[in-house]
Image (tube, helix red, strand yellow):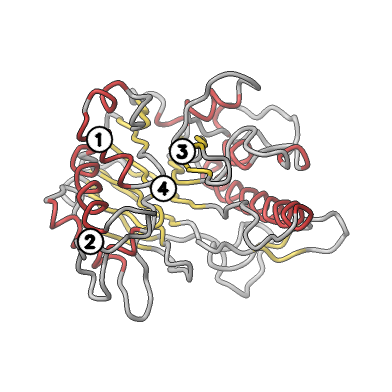
Amino acid sequence: MRIATYNVEWFSELFDNAGNLMPDEKISGRDDISREDQITALGIVFERLDADMIMVIEAPDQSRKRNTVTALETFAAHFGLRASKGMIGFANTTQQEIAVLYDPTILTMRHDPKGDEPGKRDTDIAPRFDGYFKIDLDIDATEDKVSFSKPPLELEVETRGGFRFRMIGAHLKSKAPHGASTPEEAMQISIANRRKQWAQAVWLRRRIEEHLNRADPLIVLGDLNDGPGLDEYEGLFGRSSVEIIMGRGLTDRVLPVEAKLFDPHAAQGLSRKLGAIPTTARFYLEDQDRYLQALLDYIMVSQEFMAKRPSWRIWHPFDTPECLADTTLRTALLVASDHFPVTLDIEF
């Protein structure tokens, strides 16, 4: 079975309000790329992935006038994808949903959020992801309320062979200092965003621990907008979001292996201060006239999956030999999105 996560930059811009694709020459949400070219490129990438399930980050918008599932299923039908059925959890207001496309002949799944409904308070379990989380962010003895701009998607999944597991798709808030007009403002916004992202990671980790304590097989995947050493503010909080979610904890206490999640790319990045690490995204920095590469996208698994011969791949157009050698696929990956897919092949 192949499980994928893929952040598709402004996927929503490729559909009209009825969920129909718009393959025309108008510029998509991607700079200097037409909607037709981005749609064609995405079709090539999704077809080559041939995944049984794709967690789509920045999926088409869900609102009063637009429907995420309709758009995704239209896209899947247009390109004849096996992963033809769509599902969404809690909608958000960013026009960048978290949704899933999957093969209904291989998998059954349902949106199954855990935690208390908004407004209720239970100290024993983490709140539901469409509510809020209370935590002291700035050590002033006062609890702050933190919410997700994009609530994680919680799924109960069952394979055709009867294996059941939990899956959480996540897209944590970016730390970019949008709106800053001075270096001082940029620093203040960056630190505030880092605090919020850190709190979201703690919240997500608490849900993960609830599943691991029940021995639920678990996969957490998506765009965490964070990686080891990504910015200078990480040191203020002791741990990156990735480390918290994987189970490296908020302290130096060593957790048993069954309390941790594993992703080989994250482990490689966290094992070194200098040197090359895998990357899953590529952004153009206009002010510096260069590209920045970063490790942002992950598929983390609990220990139950480690005996099932897991094999991870980043579909990087230059770093993965198969993608580099295939001119059509390499070009499609660069045109389709500023992120590259990550896949997990596993034997059920």
Secondary structure under badge 2?
loop
| Residue picked out by circle 3 | 298
Alpha-carbon distance for marks 4 and 1? 15 Å
Image side of residue 341 versus residue 302, left or right: left
| Residue picked out by circle 2 | 25
Tell me the number on the disc at residue 167.
4
Q: Which is more toward the observer, 242 or 249?
A: 242
Q: Quadrant of the C terminus?
A: top left
Residue lying farthest bottom? 64
Image side of residue 188 versus residue 193, left or right: right
Name the residue rendered at 53%, 43% in the picture: 285
Residue type, label 3: Tyr
Percent position (x, y) of residue 87?
Answer: 31, 61
Q: Nearer the viewer, mark 3 or mark 4?
A: 3
Mark 2 / mark 3, whichever is N-terminal: 2
Mark 4 / mark 2, whichever is N-terminal: 2
Mark 2 / mark 1, whichever is N-terminal: 1
